[in-house]
Amino acid sequence: MISHRAVALLLIVTVAAASACAPREAPAVQKELELGPHRLQVSAPAGWDVLDQGAQKRFRKGEADIVLQNLGKVDWEPALASLQDDQRREVKSRRTLTIDNHDAMDIETWNRLDHSWPQRLLFIRADDDLLAIHTTRLADPDTVKAFESICQSLHLSASVRR
């Protein structure tokens, strides 16, 4: 007959082995990116790939997609109109904030008819340029978490004028 001590020891060994074999999510990866004259440091969330496509930087995980780009010398409202279909979408919420000593606007939009299909946008005024971070598809909970992580980790270095 197996003693209680042997059962407890077997249970401890099993739990330790299971936790050692459990998949662990990789830590966030620090990236340095250039958007025109602007240098940015950002942490890519664990499991998300960063693609440098020149004028656009993409954070991707499966079908989820977050884009970072420099929209140039433009104001908030024309920038918002250029990134969404305002015939079908409306602004759900808008708040102003400061990111790394730069004025910013965080905007959440949704479908005008049934308030579905949320998307997130963040505009940051960097010198005369407007930088944008936005979800390109449905902002599901995993994408929103990544979007917020990217925004919170964002650091703008000194601009390099060429």
Image (tube, grey):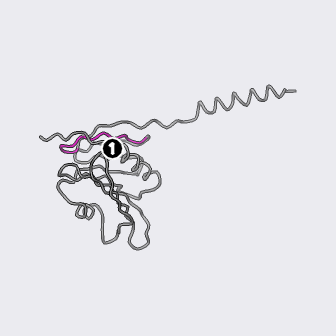
Q: Is residue 40 magenta?
A: yes
> Is residue 150 shown left or right of residue 1?
left
Q: Residue placed at 45% from the left, 56% from the top? A: 140
* Above/below status of 63 relative to 87: above
Q: Residue placed at 43% from the left, 40% from the top? A: 46
State the quadrant of the N terminus. Answer: top right
Q: Residue placed at 42% from the left, 48% from the top? A: 146
> Is residue 11 shown left or right of residue 96?
right
State the quadrant of the C terminus. Answer: top left
Q: What segment is highlighted magenta in the picture?
A: 35-45
**What is the x, y in percent for residue 99?**
31, 48
What residue is disc 1 on? 154
Q: In the image as oriented, which residue stretches furthest toward the bottom? A: 113
Task: Indicate the secondary structure of the residue bearing disc 1.
Answer: loop
Q: Residue placed at 54% from the left, 36% from the top? A: 23
Q: In the image as oriented, which residue stretches furthest toward the left? A: 162
> Is residue 3 shown left or right of residue 40?
right
**What is the x, y in percent for residue 88?**
34, 70
Q: Is the residue marked by circle 1 packed among few (<14), some (14-19), or many (20+) residues within 10 Å?
A: some
**What is the x, y in percent for residue 125?**
24, 52
* Three-letter code for the amino acid on which mark 1 is drawn: Leu
> Is residue 117 shown left or right of residue 39?
right
Closest to the observer, 138 or 81: 81
